Image: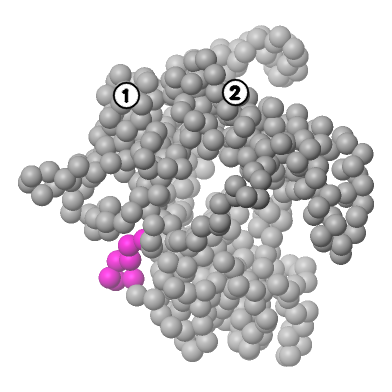
Amino acid sequence: MGTKPRGERMSPQTKTPTFLLELPLAVEAGQAARLRAHLEAGRQFYNAVLSAGQRRLRQMRADPAWREARAIPRTHTQERRAAFAALRERYGFSEYAFHELAKGLRVSWLAEHLDAVLAQTLATRAYRALNRVCVGKARRVRFKSRGRGLGSLENKRTDTGLRFVLEPQENGRTLGFLLWLDDRLPTLIDPDDPVVAHGLAHPIKYARLVRRSASSPRAQGADREGERYFVQLALAGVPYHKPKHVAGTDTVGLDLGPASIAIVPREAEARLEPLCAELRPDARAIRRLQRCMERQRRAANPEHYDERGRPTKRGTGAPRWKQSRGYQVSRRRKAARERRLAAHRKSLHGHMIHQIVAVGHTIITEKLSYTGWQKRYGKSVGLRAPGMLIAHLKRTVASTGGTLHRSPHVRRNCPNGVMDAGRSSPSRSRSAGTSARAASGRCSATCTPRFWPPTSIQ
């Protein structure tokens, strides 16, 4: 059930590089209301598919054959894979099976808001979320609440449903429109922007509608609910590179810490730099907003607190939490501060990444667990986001034709007798590890992870 026969399966398509181009949408009040209705229908449909898929996952795990498949040694790869594949086939836990499930759930009024292709993409999203739980990469799935809503909705084709079209004009300019059902949403295109011109010159793979919250309904481009809408175009090719960003040819070793990074090129001089040193969050202002939101929440929901001011446990049929207008204003103000902080952090990451790539586009770094850092250095990691820096570096290096390698293991001791970053030591908490020692003169640069056997990341 839910798996195509071998004769009907299509040959795997060749993967091509993809990059994104985001354009703002100029929506009217009626169009914004219809978009909210479409996204609300998508949210309910996604939750329905996720709930049905969760039942299938629980039934599959309750089957005694699941325990027998888990008991098969991992060295018997083919036998273990065949046992789990048979269970997935029996209980319909596959992407194609979820597509069939979506076909049965897209009925009545849901079919007026979602076409078949959008329903399949939502079913694929639900399957991937449940599959992470199935393979042990996540503990549970998250349903989309009505307050949070569905933030994005994407297509997987360009000839039907949600799609983007370009219309050249007689004056030489080009207009872009996002077509969805009966709406024709114009986009704001800057003809003098080289990034936009480069992106629109490439073929479009699919379009994605994105909804983001603004600071207030009076913000530029926001509707009466304080939300902005954008279209993201998945384009075939590589992103635009500014002429000032030139990739080097050296090999660079990186050693990243929670609050610092050591950059050790093969030929140039090594250096140790703080991570996002210019990032200065206004913690006092954020804390004042949090206290204000707590007072407004308590004033609007006295029934949710006992006589001592402690939150009561919610049971079946408990009243819902109410949100006053003042609370919503305070929440938008806090979200705007967090959004500006995230944008500044992303800008500082990009500046440092371009500095690294200017030295060399062959990057070798250590394989680290950023989740473990979050548990031990949560405040520092949450502020500077070292894992996001590596993810951004990986994309930038790939777009320049370079490679990023991660060392699969760490040597315990260097040739000079200095204990390296593999051991738990107080110096590891705020330093950048082995390469930091090389940068500070405590150890030679030959002890950096760039000389260990690397594993290429595709």
In the image, residue 176 above or below residue 277? above
Mark 2, secondary structure of its residue: helix
Pointer 2 local density, CA inside 10 Å: few below 14, some 14–19, many at least 20: some
Q: On the image, which quarter does residue 230 sit in?
A: top left
At horizontal 90% and vertical 59% (from top left) the residue drawn is: 73
Q: Is residue 375 visible?
A: yes
The disc placed on residue 204 is none
Pointer 1 local density, CA inside 10 Å: few below 14, some 14–19, many at least 20: few
Measuring from the top left, give residue 215's x and y in whole percent: 38, 32
From the viewer's perspective, tell me whether residue 406 is left or right of residue 79.
Answer: left
Name the residue carrying label 1.
182
| Residue 244 is inside the magenta segment | yes
Mark 1, secondary structure of its residue: loop
Type of residue at label 1?
Answer: Asp
Measuring from the top left, give residue 395's x and y in whole percent: 48, 62
At horizontal 81% and vertical 60% (from top left) the residue drawn is: 78
Type of residue at label 2?
Answer: Leu
Q: Quadrant of the C terminus?
A: bottom right
Q: Nearer the viewer, residue 448 or 418?
A: 448
The disc placed on residue 105 is 2
In the image, residue 38 above or below residue 434? above
Q: On the image, which quarter does residue 209 sit in?
A: top left
| Residue 432 is inside the magenta segment | no
Q: Main secondary structure of the magenta part?
A: loop
Count of numbered circles in the view: 2
Residue reaching furthest to the front: 7
Labels 2 and 1: the sequence-earlier one: 2
Q: Is residue 389 visible?
A: no
In the image, residue 431 above or below residue 9? below
Q: Which residues are magenta?
A: 239-245
